[in-house]
Image (cartoon, rainbow, N blue to C red):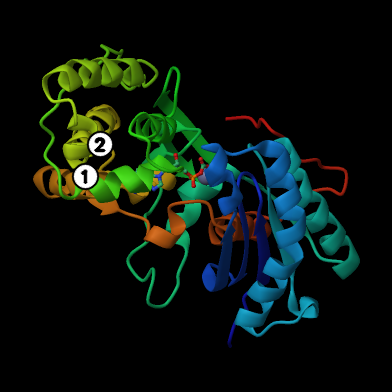
Amino acid sequence: MTMTLPRILAIETSCDDTSVATLEGFQVRSNVVYTQVLHEQYGGVVPELASRAHMEALVPTVDSALKKAGWALKDVDAVAVTQGPGLLGSLLVGHSYAKSLALSLGVPLLNVHHMEAHMLAHFLVEPGIQETAIPGFPYLCLTVSGGHTQLVVVHEWNRFEVLGETQDDAVGEAFDKAAKLLSLSYPGGPVIDRLAQSGKPIFTFAQPQMPALTFSYSGLKTSVMRSMQARVKEVPASLTDELSDWCASIQVALVQPLLEGLQAASLQTGITRIALAGGVSANSHLRQSCQTLASELGWDLYLPPFSYTTDNAAMVGAAGYFAFQHQRYGSMSSAAKAKMHD
Ligand code: KG4
Ligand code: ZN
């Protein structure tokens, strides 16, 4: 007997990426991401412009995702959508569209928590992109994005235990702020990562003393700035001539606490299935260091493919498929939320 898997259309509009994916169960058929480059000129996401851009991009992105999969709208069995957390105006565009689509097609609406979707991206299967083993529950997930820095035990698809998190800025935010100090473009994380490849971490910065499993990134900007001022006195062109060394040094300083946190959390919980999630999990130094730790400490490491690290709708589809299997359908009176339960 062949089982037909439900066909899920997934929508993500929580920040500055308009993304739509089609999935059969966990199998990704298409994952279209339209990144709003218009924010680059402002050095950060402008919420009002983001929601307008979502309004313009959403329908063409849905069309493109359906076309790539060879589906028509009538083929869709459920609509998954990010309900929150994120920018309210942006979320509203995707969420109200998803509600009306589900209503008009007469199919279930699947409300998805954006951060849970990042953590459940490991279940996606896509030929040529993600073919490796999927983690079993429970696994320990380091969730690192522009808004979050958390150590989470994923007990079940809908049971997440936050062991510790940042007390102030998120690590992605710290990458972006540091990049601004170096006059690099937004978002700064990928630029720092690229430039760091040819640099050496020769500069050091004061690291805050934090309680176990917690992080703090708000002070780093000041301490980077102080180091820069001191260095520029000795080498006036340091910020351009030694740019790649600054990037490598900042990257090491930002990643080090994450590696320490992961080791401590693994030791405390006894969990050795380790996963990374969120935009910063694309960082090459973080990925390489985790691979080294994994071979030293016997971890089973799950690194998301690059296309599932930053915001994408495929991960929303993965979380949505879990909800579908458990018949946790969203109601037509549900609303987008800027803040969600943790
Ligand atoms: O998960 P994400 O796409 O959006 C949020 O939900 O926040 O994460 C975006 C963040 C940005 O701060 C960006 O600079 C960072 O992820 N990022 C990186 C890299 N790629 C993206 N940070 C460091 N290295 C990277 N390669
Ligand atoms: Zn995200």
- Looking at the image, residue 290 sits to the left or right of residue 34; the answer is left
> At numbered mark 1, what does the secondary structure look like: helix, strand or loop?
helix
Residue closer to the observer: 73 or 327: 73
Q: Name the residue rendered at 75%, 49% in the picture.
A: 52
Q: Amino acid at mark 2?
A: Gln
Q: Position of residue 85 (x, y in %)?
A: 63, 37
> Could you tell me which quadrant the C terminus lies in?
top right
* Residue marked by disc 2: 251
Q: Position of residue 187 (x, y in %)?
A: 45, 43
Q: Is mark 2 within 8 Å of ligand 1?
A: yes
Q: Name the residue rendered at 11%, 39% in the picture.
A: 200
- Of marks 1 and 2, which one's residue comes earlier in the chain? 1
* Residue marked by disc 1: 196
Q: Are marks 1 and 2 in contact (CB under 8 Å)?
A: yes
> Does the rendering let one see residue 138?
no
Q: Position of residue 69 (x, y in %)?
A: 61, 80
